[in-house]
Amino acid sequence: MMDREQPVGVIDSGVGGMSVLRWLQEKMPHEHFIFIGDTARTPYGDRPREEIIRFVGEMTAFLERRHIKQLVVACNTITVLGTNIIRDGHDFDVIGMGKGALMIRGVTKNNRVGFMATDFTVSTGAHKAEIERVDPGVKVFGQGCPKLVPLIEAEKFGTPEMKAAVREYADMLKTHDVDTVLLSCTHYPFLQKDIEEAFGGGVTVLDPAAMTVGHAYEVLEEKHLLNPAGDGRADVCFTADLERARRLAAHMLDMGRCDFHLIDLKK
């Protein structure tokens, strides 16, 4: 039997999922979170499907040994593999990254919507299909952004190299006359201001993590598993480069509510 005191697990291929953890801590301030960023093997976007599934299995097994009550997949690349792969054999619910399809209603004026993601995520066609299913009148344009995750992981914030990469991908989407853009990789909120600046005032940039966290909250509430009191904290765990990951966390998290750990997924 699960109880309210159990932690919520959060997994990501690297550091980007901390943007989701930020939303989770804001929405559920009494919860204890265990976040795993697989910094030893990031990025996942260009890896074979079978390899990603194996890595996810190792992270999930680690969290199951910590008796989590819910697992939030803070990574679009992992989510598009299918949460059923993760859920199989586990008692806890698995919440995948939302594609943000419902967020664009009332936002786009010209029904031309773009999304920025890893090449793998774009190649699956899942985001495009979901947005078009929710609103068949919308034209959807996906843009792979292979340079962004390595630059974020390398802490290249504010550099000419980073600005040029953001501008490159924004310019590609601008050719489609989009007026709304979804950040369909959890790393990209680290660059949200830069991305907004590159698009200019006529384009709205949305972070689907807000919807994902709302779903996670609703599921816990329905199952009477929300922790009603206490000062929530997060164990923020990485498989390599702890000090670098901690520096990146300072761009995204309330450091006073986090404890950082270097972990071995086999233990």
Image (cartoon, rainbow, N blue to C red):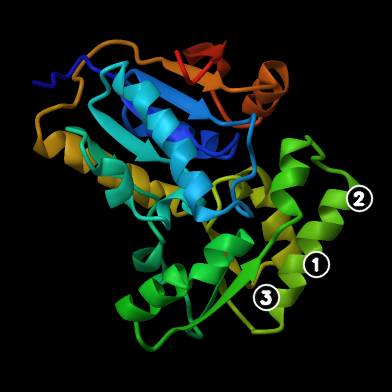
Q: Which residue is mark 3?
A: 173
- Residue 66 higher or lower than 132, as above or below: above
Q: Is residue 26 left or right of residue 219?
A: right
On the question of residue 181 being in view, the answer is no
Mark number displayed over residue 242:
none
Asked whether the residues under the numbered discs 3 and 1 touch, taking CB atoms below 8 Å apart as contact, a structural biologist would say no
- Residue 61 higher or lower than 162, as above or below: above
Q: Which residue is mark 1?
A: 168
Mark number displayed over residue 160:
2
Q: Residue at x 44, y 48 (%)?
A: 209
> What is the distance, in whole Å, between disc 3 and disc 2 at their CAs?
20 Å
Q: Residue at x 35, y 55 (%)?
A: 82
- Report the front residue among 137 and 239: 239
Q: Which residue is at the far bottom?
A: 137
**Quarter of the image where the N terminus is located:** top left
The kind of residue tagged 3 is Leu
The kind of residue tagged 2 is Pro
Percent from the top left, x then y, of residue 44?
A: 59, 47
Say whether disc 3 or disc 2 marks the residue closer to the N-terminus.
2
Percent from the top left, x then y, of residue 195?
A: 69, 57
Q: Secondary structure at mark 1?
A: helix
